[in-house]
Amino acid sequence: MSTAERLVESTRDLLWERGYIGTSPKAIQQRAGVGQGSMYHHFAGKPDLALAAINRTAQEMRAKAEEQFSASGDATERITAYLRREREVLKGCPIGRLTQDPDVMADPMLRAPVEETLAWLRDRLAEILAEGRERGELDAALDPQATAATVVAVLQGGYVLARAADSPAPFDQAITGVLGLLAAHTSTAPK
Amino acid sequence: MSTAERLVESTRDLLWERGYIGTSPKAIQQRAGVGQGSMYHHFAGKPDLALAAINRTAQEMRAKAEEQFSASGDATERITAYLRREREVLKGCPIGRLTQDPDVMADPMLRAPVEETLAWLRDRLAEILAEGRERGELDAALDPQATAATVVAVLQGGYVLARAADSPAPFDQAITGVLGLLAAHTSTAPK
């Protein structure tokens, strides 16, 4: 791995574990095994490095979600696959957690990828739900945009509950609950 | 307000705004207008002060929720009133946000009130949902425990989405979505 690469990867790890406010340039250098001069040769400073780290994490998150979103299956199957995918539940969401970082939220450059990623997730889920409704897989009363926001919120909030309980159980329960609620909107008519 | 009181209130504000990792003893003293010696006269240190602050916030959160939980109305009405209550959405949840603070999660004393408050919320909502099911307000297929976890997760995740978007709109959408899903489980039989 190149020096720049090691710095970005170390920043990603530290942002996930300790957040932006809790990550010092010194901690990044130590984890990457890179000196201060070398770090400032590659990056203008902590915000610059954090932006590269957040952009990469956001990109990965989209690519992983798209695997389930564009798979075969009806709307409910694809959403179930997305929600039930294996996750490091106790670590929480590396993008969602940044919303609790006042310095990230106060910086439009750093906030942009956080905002865009969560908006993209909602939009993609809304598309899938709208598609399912058109195909008659979901009943007409279902509001795709609102339901999509609910699904993303359940995931983000599920992480909060799991971290509070130091157990993935409440995360799994929250997913079971929303899928149960969604099931009542699944059309019983033959496809 | 007494000195101890001012210190606790300042700590509550700072924990909400900047989290535990982002709150220094010095910042607490400055906001409270209290000297270092006076702070250490009243509290052993930052963890001790944070515990008092978190306990008070947790107590207030329960009392506010209980206002809607124990109001009159059927299960759906009380849950709707709870979810639609006026909130400082963009500030997020002062308890939920602490789950992103590695130093709070690593300290069993500080984590306890966070865990207990979110567990209590889930249990109370599960009771209300179970009651609604017994009374025939909600259909028998509804899983009270899982649905309660979903409702708490939607709130916590709704805050994340609102902060990311710098707008309460996605929070409101997530609430609309879960209430829409819940409506499909509302018994259509005459009460």
Image (spheres, coloured by chain):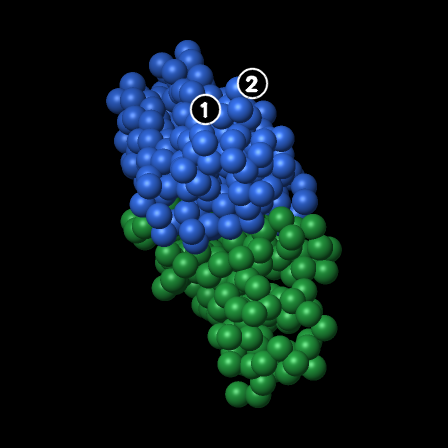
Chain colours: A blue, B green
Q: Is residue B32 left or right of residue A152?
A: right
Judge whether residue A15 can be spotted in this image.
yes
Q: Where does the image place residue A139, in percent across and percent down from the top left?
A: 32, 29
Q: Which residue is mark 2?
A: A1
Residue marked by disc 1: A60
Looking at the rendering, which quadrant does residue A176 occupy? top right
Q: Residue at x 34, y 24 (%)?
A: A128
Q: Quadrant of the C terminus of chain B?
A: bottom left
Point 55% across, 75% down: residue: B29
Quadrant of the image occupied by residue A30: top right
Q: Name the subunit of mark 2.
A: A
C-alpha distance separating marks 1 and 2: 18 Å
**As rendered, which of A122 and B29 lies closer to the eye?**
B29
Of labels 1 and 2, the one closer to you: 2
Q: Amino acid at mark 1?
A: Glu
Task: Residue A70 in the image: state x and y as whole percent.
Answer: 38, 16
